[in-house]
Image (cartoon, helix red, strand yellow):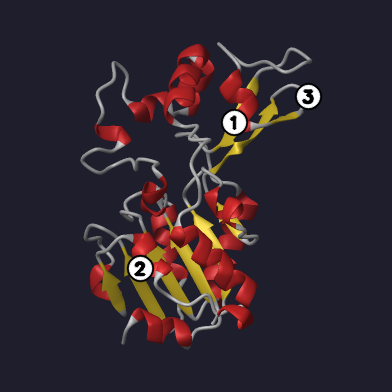
Amino acid sequence: MTLREIIDKSNKIVFFGGAGVSTESGIPDFRSEDGLYRQKYDVPPETMLSSAYFYSHTADFYRFYRDKMLPLSAQPNAAHKKLAEWERAGKLLAVVTQNIDGLHQAAGSKAVYELHGSIHRNHCLACGKSYTAQFIADSTGVPHCSCGGLIKPDVVLYGEPLDGATVQGALEAIMAADTLIVAGTSLTVYPAAGFVDYFHGKHLVLINRDATPLDGKCSLVLHQKMGEVLGALPSYLPNEK
């Protein structure tokens, strides 16, 4: 069965995506040969993106964060746009994403569960005031609130738990799905990688450049570029068929 045939017959699709979904928007992934975690730094990126490092080396954290984690000029690609169209057409229940770039929302998706938070939300640890990603990008040194408090990005750093409500919503969506599309993720980061175990629908589809531990359990496996695969499919909107 082709992906087109699967999507044609599905009405409760959930898309579960990782860093590979945004690479066609010019955002590097983490674990590939050219990924962020393969680059050479005096301190490993995994350490710099930890909660402990944020509080103990805040200035160094923000230097790295501004340089590598704020791709504010990136635009949604064909995959982001197609998923938003499917949601408007009533075929897609939700997007569950490990990404923090906000590109699904920028494409028009509404039901998005951001497991690792978002660069577009930042708050003062003292008073709770919100700040934009642009504010963080334009600031220098350690950004502080108008009240003097330290501002922290609402992203899940290493050593921090996932948000309980976000996890619950994501799992409920996956359990309700008739088709689960897993895309652009190595499925090696837990607990997110274990979310696939909650799917009991009809079709499990994997779209990823490299092989994953899930390949042998899928209805369909495509080792192709995300945007090319999804972009070639219909929108299913009444006036765009």
Of badges 1 and 2, the one in the foreground is: 2
Report the Cα–Cα distance between label 1 and label 2.
Answer: 33 Å
Sequence-first tag of 3 and 1 = 3
Q: Position of residue 213 (x, y in %)?
A: 25, 62
Q: Which residue is drawn at 55% across and 83% down?
A: 11
Q: Residues within 10 Å of mark 1 (few under 14, many from 20)?
A: many
Residue at numbered disc 1: 153
Q: How crowded is mark 2: few (under 14 residues within 10 Å), some or many (20 or more)?
A: some
Mark 2 in CB contact with mark 3 (< 8 angstroms): no
- Residue type at the position of mark 1: Pro
Q: How many marks?
A: 3
Quadrant of residue 131 within the rendered picture: top right
Q: Is mark 3 on a helix, strand or loop?
A: loop
Q: Would residue 237 appear left or right of 145 to someone viewing this image?
A: left
Report the Cα–Cα distance between label 3 and label 1.
Answer: 14 Å
Residue at numbered disc 3: 127
Q: Position of residue 228 (x, y in %)?
A: 35, 64
Q: Which residue is drawn at 36% across and 73% down?
A: 205
- Residue type at the position of mark 3: Cys
Q: What element carries label 1?
A: strand
Sequence-first tag of 2 and 3 = 3
Q: Where is residue 158 in the image (x, y as percent from the top left)?
A: 45, 34
Does the image show residue 93?
no
Q: Residues within 10 Å of mark 3 (few under 14, many from 20)?
A: some
- Residue type at the position of mark 2: Val
Residue at numbered disc 2: 229
